[in-house]
Amino acid sequence: MMKKQFALLVFAFLIITSCGNEDPPTKDDCGGQACEATPGTDETATTVPNSLHGTYNMVITYAESNSPYPEGTTATFIIAAEKLTVSIDGEDCFSIINPVNRSPFTAPTFKADCIGDIAFQVAANQSGGLEEINLILASGPGYYGQFRVQ
């Protein structure tokens, strides 16, 4: 009897611990809206490199005067190969599916044009880790500011 209880306990532990941060986000990670972007002019479909996947707590450290979010705004980003989940403090979270590359840049860009004229460009540093997430216009060239890891 004791062996069965131990086996059940081990089995339950394995199930619980197998659902860690390595799992990619799903549509249910955020109860908010989901934008599904399609490549536009001078854009191609892409995926985010594995080295950038994860959950990041970030803050806008620089914002242009026309930015929808002022300096100091905090947010949590969950980055996966084909999905970005965005939770900006004080707002409903949302997800963006299908990143694109915009010529001449190589950083994956998630267009949230179903939310507003915003997009998030995931920029890597020279080591392949996350450098910043640039807040840019979804409709084309333009820059609002940048999120940096807190």
Image (cartoon, rainbow, N blue to C red):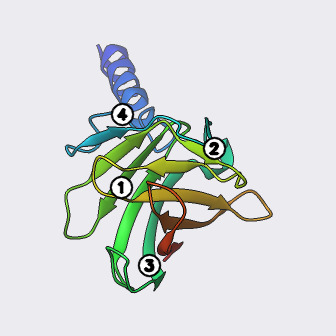
Give whichever of discs 4 and 2 has the lower sequence position: 4
11 sits left or right of 134 in the view: left
Tell me the SS state at disc 4: loop
Residue 26 is marked as 4
For discs 1 and 4, the disc positioned in front in the rendered view: 1
Splitting the image into 4 quarters, where does residue 30 fall? Answer: top left
Crowding at mark 4 (Cα within 10 Å: few <14, some 14-19, many 20+): few
For discs 1 and 2, the disc positioned in front in the rendered view: 2
Residue 60 is marked as 3
Image location of residue 94, percent across then percent down? 29, 49
Which one is in front, 63 or 1? 63
Crowding at mark 2 (Cα within 10 Å: few <14, some 14-19, many 20+): few
Disc 3 + disc 2, Cβ < 8 Å? no
Tell me the SS state at disc 1: strand
Report which residue position mark 2 lands on: 42
Give whichever of discs 4 and 3 has the lower sequence position: 4
Q: How much space separates mark 4 and mark 3, taking CA atoms?
A: 26 Å
Give whichever of discs 1 and 3 has the lower sequence position: 3
Image location of residue 92, percent across then percent down? 19, 57
Report which residue position mark 1 lands on: 86
Tell me the SS state at disc 2: loop
Residue at the image position 36 percent from the left and 58 percent from the top = 117
Residue at the image position 44 percent from the left and 49 percent from the top = 111
Residue type, mark 3 in image: Ile
Q: How much space separates mark 1 and mark 3, taking CA atoms?
A: 13 Å
Give whichever of discs 1 and 2 has the lower sequence position: 2
Q: How much space separates mark 1 and mark 4, taking CA atoms?
A: 13 Å
Picture mark count: 4
Residue type, mark 2 in image: Asp
